[in-house]
Image (cartoon, helix red, strand yellow):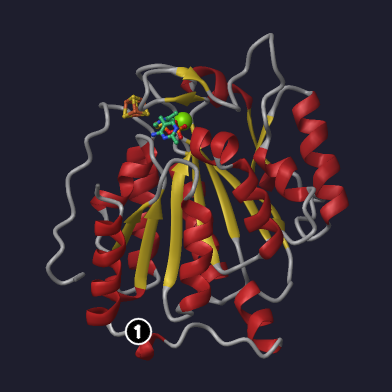
């Protein structure tokens, strides 16, 4: 399938941050020599999710907000795959927020790239959970991740600062390829059409690498440092937290549970069952 699949060209507006995310992901896959036939890219619904059409890999387009349970399932069923999930801030922090919390707590080896633009781009500019306004407090995905004790990799980058984005994408992919668990990378990826946050976010971004005493292995001090920067109206970026805790799929095996035996899955039988199921819905 990956031999015959021809990736599409992106359909994003000129200047959309999502181009930068795609560039960093293809660059990291190529730098780490990850073959297409061992890569699965799953995506949510949104302008961000259409990245799945453009990359040579096995692909799956989930319902809006539902990308993570399927990605975790794929990682557990076939540990030989490098599983990547991608989606927007609406997808991950609104309708999919419950799944994000549980993916952080499970720590299956999945790279989750959340493209944050503070808006629902695809549906033409409604406020998302990270939108900043007078009515509600925006969600901070890094603080959310730090508050969940199963999390093992939390980072934030911006498409404006390509070198840091490229580095963090590689580090996140390495975390997942080494089966160290769930790597959460939030990328500030502005929507130039409905919510051009470039000027504001550029001015407020704060690189944690500029703080020599910042310790990304200490959860409590990382939380305090991120919160302090937020209190000063800054947006912390960089590797915010990394920890060691056995990945979900490894804990499964330790408990005597086996990943799905893919050899036993005969596509002919399962294809027929799937078609029967689908036709049973027809009236
Ligand atoms: C269950 C469901 N609810 C709502 C929608 C409509 N919808 C499609 S994309 C989207 C939000 C997209 O925003 P985001 O996830 O931030 O991605 P972006 O387009 O900004 O990259 C919504 C609400 C949908 N497709 N399915
Ligand atoms: S509407 Fe916004 S998020 Fe969607 S492609 Fe255009 S700039 Fe990007
Ligand atoms: Mg969005």
Q: Position of residue 191 (x, y in %)?
A: 40, 25
What residue appears at the point 53 percent right and 64 percent down from the top-left corner? 72
Residue at image position (59%, 53%) is 184
In this rendering, the answer to whether 259 lies above or below 68 is below
Question: Alpha-carbon neighbours of circle 1 within 10 Å: few (<14), some, or many (≥20)?
Answer: few
In the rendered structure, the answer to whether residue 133 lies left or right of residue 62 reads right
- For the point 31% across and 43% down, which residue is it? 50
Regarding residue 170, the answer to whether it shows in the image is: no
- Residue 110 % position (x, y): 53, 64
Total marks drawn?
1
Q: Which residue is mark 1?
A: 265
Taking 223 as reference, is 27 left or right? left
* Residue drawn at 49 percent across, 49 percent down: 113
Q: Is residue 90 left or right of residue 135?
A: left
Q: Position of residue 107 (x, y in %)?
A: 65, 65
Q: Secondary structure at mark 1?
A: loop
Which residue extends farthest top?
134
Q: Is residue 160 visible?
A: yes
* Foreground pick, 50 / 68: 68
Out of 50 and 219, give the one closest to the viewer.
50
Quadrant for the N terminus in the image = bottom left
Q: Is residue 244 above or below residue 60?
A: below
Dividing the image into four equal quarters, which quarter contains ligand 1? top left
> Foreground: 158 or 10?
10
Q: Is residue 52 left or right of residue 96?
A: left
Rendered image quadrant of residue 121: top left
């Amino acid at each position: 399938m990956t031999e015959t699949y021809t990736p599409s060209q992106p359909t994003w507006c000129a200047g959309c941050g999502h181009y930068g995310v795609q560039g960093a992901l293809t660059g990291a896959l190529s730098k780490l020599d990850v073959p297409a036939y061992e890569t699965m890219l799953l995506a949510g619904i949104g302008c961000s999710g259409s990245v799945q059409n453009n990359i040579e890999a096995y692909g799956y387009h989930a319902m809006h907000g539902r990308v993570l349970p399927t990605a975790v399932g794929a990682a557990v069923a076939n540990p030989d795959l490098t599983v990547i999930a991608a989606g927007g801030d609406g997808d991950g922090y609104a309708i999919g927020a419950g799944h994000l919390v549980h993916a952080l707590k499970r720590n299956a080896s999945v790279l989750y790239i959340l493209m944050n633009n503070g808006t629902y781009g695809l549906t033409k500019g409604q406020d998302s959970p990270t939108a900043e306004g007078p009515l509600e407090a925006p969600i901070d995905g890094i603080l959310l991740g730090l508050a969940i004790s199963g999390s093992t990799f939390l980072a934030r980058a911006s498409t404006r600062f390509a070198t840091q984005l490229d580095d963090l994408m590689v580090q996140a992919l390495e975390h997942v390829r080494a089966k160290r668990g769930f790597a959460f990378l939030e990328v500030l990826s502005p929507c130039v059409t409905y919510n051009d946050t470039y000027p504001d976010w550029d001015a407020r971004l704060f690189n944690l690498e500029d703080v020599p005493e910042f310790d990304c292995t200490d959860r409590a001090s990382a939380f305090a440092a991120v919160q302090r920067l937020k209190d000063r109206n800054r947006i912390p970026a960089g590797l915010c937290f990394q920890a060691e805790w056995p990945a979900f799929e490894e804990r499964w095996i330790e408990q005597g549970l086996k990943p799905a035996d893919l050899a036993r899955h005969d596509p002919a039988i399962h294809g027929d069952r799937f078609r029967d199921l689908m036709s049973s819905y027809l009236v």
